[in-house]
Image: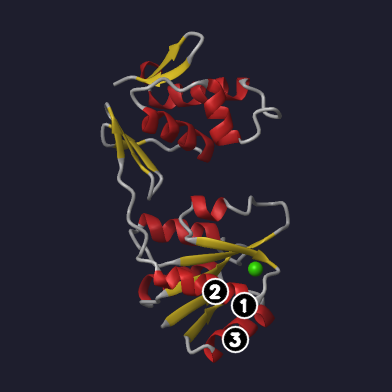
Amino acid sequence: MRLLVVEDEARMADALARGLQAEGFVVDVEPDGPGGLEAARFGGYDAVVLDVMLPGMSGYTVVRTLREEQNWVPVLMLTAKDGEYDEADGLDYGADDYLTKPFSFVVLLARLRAMLRREPAPRPAALRVGPLTLDPASRRVEREGAEVPLSRREFLVLEHLMRAHPAVVSKESLLDAIWGAPDEADANIVEVYVGYLRRKLGRERIETVRGVGYRLAS
Ligand code: CA
C-alpha cells in the first residue's frame, strides 16, 4: 500500500513516515499544498494523510480540487484545534475522515486501515429541480447549465431545499440543519440567506409558504 503524507512540520512528517513505514506502507512526503496536490493527482496512492495548514495551499483546497477533478483517493485530514476552522469542515470539502492534532499514532493507524478497507466513496448523485442542478460531490450548482457560484452556507440551504423538494421546509429546520444551535442563532439569518439565493438563482425559484417556510419552485 502506498501512502502520501502532506505535512509541512518536518518532525511530524518524519515521525508519521517512519511509523507508517514500520507498519509496511510505502510512504512519500510532500511539505506543501501545491506539491501535495500534484503528487495526489499523479502518484497513484492508496490513501493521503493531509494536513490542513500548509504553505502554498490549504489542505481544504487540495481535497476540494481533487474531488472537483473526480479524484476519489481516500483522504484523512489532520486538523489543528486552533479555532480558525471547524474541525469537521474537511468532510464538507470531500475528506473521508479527519483527526484533530494532537492525536495518537495508534488511532491514526486504525483510521487509515478502516479507510483503506472501505470501497472508494460512491459519487453522490446530482440533485435536479427545475432548471437547477446541484452536485454534492463537486459542490457545483448550475442553472440551465451555467455555473452559479455560491458560498458554503448558501450551498447548504439550497441543498436542503432540493433534497426536500417538493415539500415545504420550515425556517426552524433549516436553522437547525445548517446553523446547528437554533437557540443561539437568529431565525432571521435564514431569511437573509434565502434572499441571497433568490438574487443568484432568480426570485421565483424559492417560494415563500406563509407561516410554514420555503419551497423550491418546480
Ligand atoms: Ca501544518
Quarter containing ligand 1?
Answer: bottom right
Image point (38%, 35%), residue name: 148
Label disc, if present, on residue 19 of the rendered structure: 3
Q: Can you name the residue that lies furthest to the right here?
A: 82
Residue sitting at x 37%, y 59%: 121
Q: Nearer the viewer, residue 152 or 157?
A: 157
Residue at 56% across, 23% down? 172
Mark 2, secondary structure of its residue: helix
Quarter of the figure with the N terminus = bottom left
- Applied colour scheme: secondary structure
- Is tag 3's residue or tag 1's residue first in the polypeptide sequence? 3
Give the CA separation, mark 2 to mark 1. 6 Å
Q: Which quadrant is home to the C terminus?
A: top left
126 versus 185 height, above or below: below
Q: Amino acid at mark 1?
A: Val
Q: Which mark is residue 106?
A: 1
Alpha carbon distance from label 2 to label 3: 13 Å
Look at the numbered discs 2 and 1 and tell me whether their residues touch, using CB distance below 8 Å.
yes
Instruction: Specify whether residue 31 is in view.
Output: no
Q: How many marks?
A: 3
Kind of residue at disc 2: Ala
Q: CA distance from mark 3 to mark 1?
A: 10 Å
Viewer-proximal residue, 6 or 210?
210
